[in-house]
Amino acid sequence: MRPWRIVFMGTPDFSVPSLKALKEAGHEIAAVFTQPDKERGRGKKVTAGPVKKTAEMYDIPVFQPTNLRTAEVEAQLRQLAPDVIIVIAYGKILPPSIVHLPMYGCLNVHASLLPKYRGAAPIQYAIKEGDTKSGVTIMRLDEGLDTGKILKQAELSLDAEETTGSLFTKLATLGARTLTTVLADLPAYEAGAVAQEEAHATYTAKITKDMAALDWRQEAIVLERWIRTLDPSPGAYTQYAGKRLKIWSAQVVPHTSSCPPGTVIAVDKAHFTVQTGNGALRVLEVQPESRKRMKTGQFLQGTPLRVGEVLK
């Protein structure tokens, strides 16, 4: 295997396994480009992102431009002279001048089986839509949004209780392994790259905190998937006794009730069950406001939740 001279562009945890895998495979990481440091946590302390911390651990030069569309950045990249640029969850769209700069172009690790789930939230959408499989795509970037030619794909099966967090970890690992396979014979994979089938393309939009409130009028199966979609962030929630109650885990249960959606229709020592627009949800894990995640049974020990109460 020929070791490649690489510029790596990435920012969050998802990118880290690939950066480590490239380094451990013996490739030359000429530089890392990552987003500028930002305020994190309750203390709003300005800290480096996961990729920057990893690069520093390996003594790799780090660049953090606020704008890629400058002559200075292009000059830096030309001076670095990479064979290939690897882009994984960088957080910025590359201009054409960079996309076409390296001999072997810019390769991206995308967390879906393209052309399905292009865009910002492919992992979340796999959970939200109830998919039974997901995977990663190694593609060559072009000037579109996740539209480039596919070099290789790898898939995996989803567990019935898969969350965005658990799938994130699995796909980050799978992405690193698949990327190193491609780089082991890059010219052959480049030569065999295939165009995406545009007729099958779907797109995802970023999921934000203001989308996290549960709408009990929806079907139980939809709500259960949405709870797993928002785990670990931002967390699905409802309102109980005027306060926010996050719901982290629930089961769909067969139940018929004439109660309005959001009504608590059953309570025992370990769970409570809520009527939805179709079916019911047995709630297994919650997080009261300003407290930690806990099993529902622990929550019920100190909370007199009763049948007939309505969650908003």
Image (cartoon, rainbow, N blue to C red):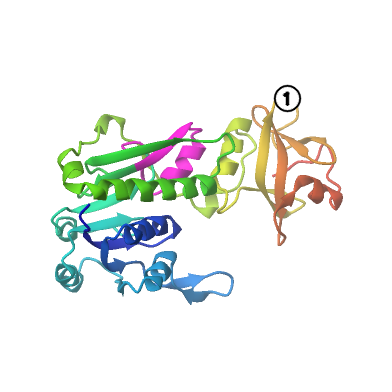
Q: Is residue 126 magenta?
A: yes
Query: Relative to the observer, which residue lies in front, 91 or 10?
Result: 10
From what the image shows, is residue 224 above or below residue 30?
A: above
Which part of the image, by quadrant, shows the C terminus? top right
Quarter of the figure with residue 73:
bottom left
Name the residue located 60 percent from the left edge and 31 percent from the top edge: 221
Residue holding disc 1? 255
Query: Relative to the observer, which residue lies in front, 227 or 60?
Result: 60
Instruction: Determine the secondary structure under disc 1.
Output: loop
Residue 248: give x, y in percent of width and height: 65, 47
Residue 18: give x, y in percent of width and height: 37, 55
Name the residue located 19 percent from the left edge and 56 percent from the top edge: 99
Residues drawn in magenta: 114-136
Name the residue located 51 percent from the left edge and 38 percent from the top edge: 128
* Residue 219 visible in image: no
Indicate left or right for 96 with 42 as reference.
left
- The type of residue carrying mark 1 is His
